[in-house]
Image: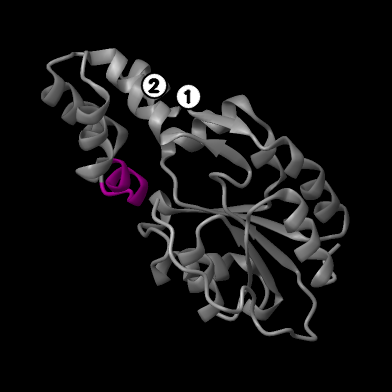
Amino acid sequence: MRRGLLAESSFAAESPMPIKTCFFDMGNVLVNFSHEKMCRNIASLCGWDYERTRTFLLDDGRQWRLERGEITEEQFHAEFCEASGACLDIDRLRHAAADIFWLNESIVPVLHELKAAGQRLVLLSNTSITHIQFIERHYTVLDLMDDRVTSFEAGALKPESRIFEVALEKAQCAPEECFYTDDIAAYINKALTFGIHARLFTTTESLRQSLKELSVL
């Protein structure tokens, strides 16, 4: 994922309209992750070195095609087996590609507080079916979301407009009544163009402070 420059204003103009829906990115917000570990995991399955694996997955765009929903897990598996010459079981490949996450435990109490305050929580994430199903199996944090907007289902990756349009369709309120946090500045900047109150995620404490400033908590 690429980082961009954050706009001078890191949030939408203050509005008397109360926040009703909070959008949360997943990677490095709800859960932390490592693309390096993904590459090393997969390299260990077929004998490739790290750089060749990174090129196949990331530099050649296969991971992003999977996250956009342009290819299925089965197509990804077939391409990998053909390129590597290793006829691996698809479940082994799924596990290697997805065993890269660990929970951001500090954010879980914040989510519970938002739920108690009556906020609608919606996931807004660039992710693949492989990754989200792994997180569902190992953590319960996504159970706190009232709805989900994922890139592979929307057919678009942040910061493309389409995924934000889908998110606002699921918000059940006006853009000015939405809050969004993400660790990628370019995505925050895009959300601002829709009138969403958006803050760059750095730490859970800074997130909590942002929510207090907007009278959400």
Q: Residues within 10 Å of mark 2 (few under 14, many from 20)?
A: some
The residue labelled by disc 1 is 99
Tag 1–tag 2 contact (CB < 8 Å): yes
Q: Position of residue 195 (x, y in %)?
A: 59, 81
Q: Is the residue 57 above or below the residue 173 in the image?
A: above
Q: Is the residue 53 above or below the residue 177 in the image?
A: above
Q: Residue at x 85, y 71 (%)?
A: 215
- Determine if residue 103 is in view: yes
Viewer-proximal residue, 185 or 158?
185
Q: Quadrant of the C terminus?
A: bottom right
Q: Which residues are magenta?
A: 63-70
Q: Secondary structure at mark 1?
A: loop
Task: Give the prevailing secondary structure in the magenta stretch.
Answer: helix
The residue labelled by disc 2 is 96
Q: Residue at x 64, y 75 (%)?
A: 11
| Residue type marked 1 | Asp
Viewer-proximal residue, 109 or 36?
36
Q: Residue at x 19, y 13 (%)?
A: 87
Q: Position of residue 30 (x, y in %)?
A: 63, 43
